[in-house]
């Protein structure tokens, strides 16, 4: 799907095997920048390289033209096919320094964050060739460039990318999608990242990994605000659950998921881990404490 003159969105369906015979259907977006060379933003899951390469060919381009893959962060549905893409094209891999170890050592990531079906979703590790820093401008050829914005919280080194000429921002997983699985490591950082995204000027298209492209400044502003409200509601419910004596994290997770009407499959260790991040800042009952941004 073409978004702007140079930016295309590619939705890639996949399944997370959670137990024998049981899978969760998910989908994730990768983004493609077509210039005199090709840049990918995220690679989706293992095997997705076939879908990506087919899409490039359908648009009259050769997968060998891929010069760089920018990884918004290291989670399986973003790095899954990057090994195959690197092996096929010898492209450069770019990411934030704090995501480097989980991209270069996927077994370390699995040990520290055991996502169900990890080895099915991730094709293997790759070396990160280029470390991206906050506010850096990355040239993607033919006068196309993007600016790096640190938006941690969902993960330690989550990045967003601002395409000023295209009036478009790619946010990875930085914006929690209301009523979807809440996944974050640092709640305060997550809120501060959304506050930073809110300050980005002249954005007409919002491209996240979790939902279809959003167009129009009013819709985008609403979406960012809804993400903060969702995090606030979760936090209030987690604090409420704990004040009722739910000390066990999985019991607390079950309580929050039911109280908020989230899908039952949200009762899992990854979501519970997010709620542990809420407990780490439970003294911040008044969310106005989190509204200051650098
Ligand atoms: Zn993620």
Image: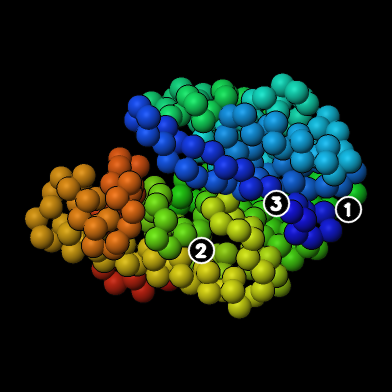
Which is nearer the N-term, disc 2 or disc 3? 3
> Relative to residue 179, is residue 216 drawn left or right?
right
**What residue sits right under mark 1 in the picture?**
143
* Disc 3 from disc 1: Cα separation: 20 Å
Element type at mark 2:
helix
Please give left or right for residue 237 compared with residue 127 in the image: left
Which of the 4 image quadrants contains residue 73?
Answer: top right
As drawn, which residue projects farthest toward the front? 21
Horizontal and vertical percent position of residue 55: 77, 41
Could you say where residue 128 lies in the image, as x and y percent from the top left? 64, 30
Quadrant of the frame with the N terminus: bottom right
Q: Position of residue 98 (x, y in %)?
A: 52, 39
Q: Which colour scheme is used?
A: rainbow
Q: Could you tell whether 49 is left or right of 182 in the image?
A: right
- Quadrant in the picture for residue 197: bottom right
Residue 12's mark? Answer: none
**Compared with residue 293, is residue 255 higher up or lower down, i.e. above or below?**
above
159 vs 23, nearest the viewer: 23
Q: How far apart are marks 1 and 2 (CA)?
A: 28 Å
Q: Residue at x 46, y 58 (%)?
A: 176
Secondary structure at badge 1 equals: loop
Residue 220 pos. (x, y %): 59, 70
């Amino acid at each position: 799907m073409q978004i702007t003159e140079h930016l295309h969105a590619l939705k890639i369906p996949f399944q997370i095997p959670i137990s024998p015979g049981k899978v969760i259907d998910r989908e994730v977006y990768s983004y493609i920048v077509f210039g005199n060379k090709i840049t990918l933003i995220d690679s989706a899951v293992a095997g997705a390289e076939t879908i990506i390469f087919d899409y490039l060919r359908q648009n009259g381009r050769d997968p060998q033209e891929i010069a760089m893959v920018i990884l918004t962060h290291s989670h399986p549905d973003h790095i899954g096919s990057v090994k195959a893409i690197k092996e096929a094209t010898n492209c450069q891999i770019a990411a934030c320094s704090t995501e480097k170890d989980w991209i270069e050592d996927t077994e370390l990531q699995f040990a520290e964050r055991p996502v169900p079906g990890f080895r099915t979703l991730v094709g293997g590790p790759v070396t990160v060739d280029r470390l991206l820093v906050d506010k850096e401008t990355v040239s993607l050829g033919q006068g196309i460039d993007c600016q790096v914005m640190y938006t941690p919280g969902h993960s330690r080194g989550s990045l967003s990318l601002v395409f000023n000429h295209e009036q478009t921002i790619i946010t990875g997983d930085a914006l929690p999608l209301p009523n979807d699985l809440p996944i974050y490591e640092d709640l305060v950082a997550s809120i501060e990242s959304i506050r930073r995204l809110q300050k980005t000027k002249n954005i007409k298209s919002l491209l996240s990994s979790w939902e279809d492209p959003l167009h129009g400044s009013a819709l985008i502003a609403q979406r960012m605000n809804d993400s903060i409200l969702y995090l606030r509601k979760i936090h209030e419910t987690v604090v409420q659950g704990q004040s009722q004596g739910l000390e066990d994290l999985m019991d607390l997770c079950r309580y929050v998921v039911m109280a908020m009407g989230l899908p039952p499959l949200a009762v899992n260790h990854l979501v519970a881990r997010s709620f542990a991040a809420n407990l780490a800042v439970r003294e911040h009952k008044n969310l106005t404490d989190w509204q200051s941004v650098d």
